[in-house]
Image (spheres, coloured by chain):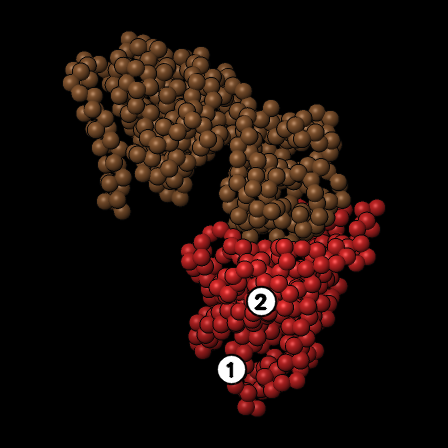
Amino acid sequence: MCFTQNFSQYLVIGLANGFLYALIALGYTLVYGVLQLINFAHSEVFMSGGFAGYFVLQAVVGKQPHGVMSVVMIVLGIAAGALGGGLVAFLLERVAYRPLRRRKAPKLAFLISAIGASYFLYNLAGKEFGRTSLSVPYIFNGSNSGIAFTIFGAQVQTIYVIWAVAAIVLLVSLDRVVAKTKLGKGIRAVAEDAETASLMGVNIDRVISQAFVLGGLLGGAAGFLFGLNFGVVYTMGFTPALKAFTAAVLGGIGNLRGAMLGGLVLGVAESLPLSCVNPAWQDVIAFGILIVVLLFRPMGLLGERLGRSA
Amino acid sequence: MQNRLLRKLAVPAVAVAVSALSLGATAATAAASAPTYTIAYEGPLSGGNAQLGLNMKFAVQLAINQANAGRTFGKLPFQLKFLPSDDQGSATQSPTAAQQVIGDSSVMAVVGPAFSGATKAAEPLYAQAHLATVSPSATAPELAQHGWRNFFRVVADDNAQGPADATFAVKTLKAKTIFSIDDGSAYASGLATAFDNAAKKMGAKVTHQTALGTTQCQAGTGNVQQYSAVATTVKDSKAPVTFYAGYYCDFALLAKSLRAAGYKGTLMSDDGSLDPHYVSEAGAKVANGTFISCACADLSKSAAAAPFAKQFEAIAHFPVGTYSAEAYDATNTIISVMKQLGPKGINRASIVNALHHVTYKGLTKVVHFQANGNIAGTAVYIYHVVKGKIVELGLAP
């Protein structure tokens, strides 16, 4: 039967994609947690990370690196992507959100502002960096997509290992930051009740900015990890970010662990049916699952609320 | 902008003047008595697709200059003038551009329109005016099905490509099973259907999937990650040949995923993939061995075409591009018909009639039209990626 044949291979592919979705989804969830707003320009934060990682690697990678140097380059690329994403997210909050918040604009105005910022950023990138896809330099043996090992008959590409390791490290770090640090306490307090938090001496503007930057760091890192395999181009953010937004809703928007779980579930839900059906059905099935889940759990798999669960 | 445009237009004008001067006194006296006819060209000369249009425009200009100088057909009993008309490649601009051409009573035939949409919009007007149009580049199959007697094209339509590709896969590559994938666009799904049907008719087993073009390539709404899963399915099918109908960017991503998954079969694609970017984006290691088809010929290695390329660059100030040679052939086909008719026989309707019987050996192929205006023969060329370069192998079987 088609579903069981090569089950492990499709599962591995789905999980690998799911880790990327999870990283991006966290950006949506963090911002939603503190602002109850969907940051529709997050796709461009993701793209900025891709370009930042590309340009840094382009500058430092001469001959193809090996062994330890490969790992150094990957870490460097992730750092560059994260910084690029964090910076763009920071500016975005300052330019597109804060002025509106100061003037107590209605929620719809934020939405339009975010969409405008998104258009501005990706068209700017298209104009500055060209309209065709740029390949990130190969930084480990052969290509960026060789086979690392085989498990239960599934071939695991090196890139999948990198995605999984990087995502797990970043997701666990974020979880710790939000749960244990003062910064995290601030974010949770604002998510729980912004007014009370401000009465208790929490600087709301700063917390919101920090939530944007944290989400931007992860989104930017994801942009680099994505570009490593698929190349970077100004339109790269559109579909992955839309899927990640879906993942965030699936897991329970505003819930960090929910976003992680939602990403993995969506990745697998997209991949597994492809053993049986035409890939044109991929989105139909994935979004069908989303609707069914929301019918039974309207708040998502783990429920809303950044404040409580983190 | 204005100034630049003027300068652009001034260059060919100077070229005409120079070639006229070089003819000397004999031509000048002949021109006094000889009638003057105009050949028009309709295509995009401004806007996003201007480059494609200019590739053709200067080729038409060159053919006319050479004919006037007596270099292609010997001394002609008439003089030719050139009228370029800008339709921006758009179906909405095209009728206006056509009307300008039709309104000039000295225009005897038109090279173009360049784009399929523009052709569809303008052709009823040209048909009513009995004005022959010979397109170097409009490939939509339906254009030949409207019964326009004045419609001709020197390229094969999209329907010719699918069966030609199928013949190549089944007969030349000897594939008994084929995995065929399209990107969901109107162009690609039409092509893939033609491919599948022809391959099945020749006894091959075809598995077909649609993997939507991705936003990564600005061609659709699909997501890039799908290609890993598609590659797994293709590998499982053990098909020795995979045919992709779509464009180079998505094809490069698919090819990379296929090789990453360990698929060893032969890759094939269509003219949408005939672009050096396919090789640069997939990497030479992945791209090598890929077969690509196109209704267009590569003239870079043809000795007969070398002078054409040189003279083209002299008046255009950029090298020959896609469909330049086809536009040159279209123009020369028209001139050959006019020469045959002579000044007494030349009028719009007689040129339409004569084009139905013409046989002219051009740079890209022997031009001979079917009754519906399509070029005779398939005229599909197969290309092969060798050592990171796309080279032409010749006409498809």
Give percent across and percent down for residue B75: 27, 14
Q: Which chain letter goes with mark 2?
A: A
- Mark 1 belongs to which amino acid? Arg
| Residue B268 seen from this side | yes
Q: CA distance from mark 1 to mark 2?
A: 32 Å
| Residue B128 seen from this side | no
Above or below: residue B381 compared with residue A78: above
Q: Is residue A170 left or right of residue B75?
A: right
For label 2, the residue is A73
For label 1, the residue is A206
Chain A as rendered: colour: red
Element on which disc 1 rests? helix
Give percent across and percent down for residue A201: 54, 90
Give percent across and percent down for residue B192: 62, 34
Q: Place residue B183 in its image quadrant.
A: top right
Identify the chain drawn in brown: B
Residue at coordinates 71% horizontally, 59% vertically from top-left?
A: A148
Count of marks, rendered view = 2
Element on which disc 2 rests? helix
Give percent across and percent down for residue B184: 60, 42
Are there few (<14), some (14-19), or many (20+) residues within 10 Å of tag 1? few
Residue at coordinates 23% horizontally, 36% vertically from top-left?
A: B10
Residue at coordinates 45% horizontally, 28% vertically from top-left?
A: B302
Residue at coordinates 49% horizontally, 51% vertically from top-left?
A: A132
**Marks 2 and 1: in contact by CB < 8 Å?**
no
Residue lying farthest to the top in this orientation: B344
Q: Is residue A27 left or right of residue B59?
A: right
Screen quadrant of the C terminus of chain A: bottom right
Above or below: residue B350 compared with residue B167: above
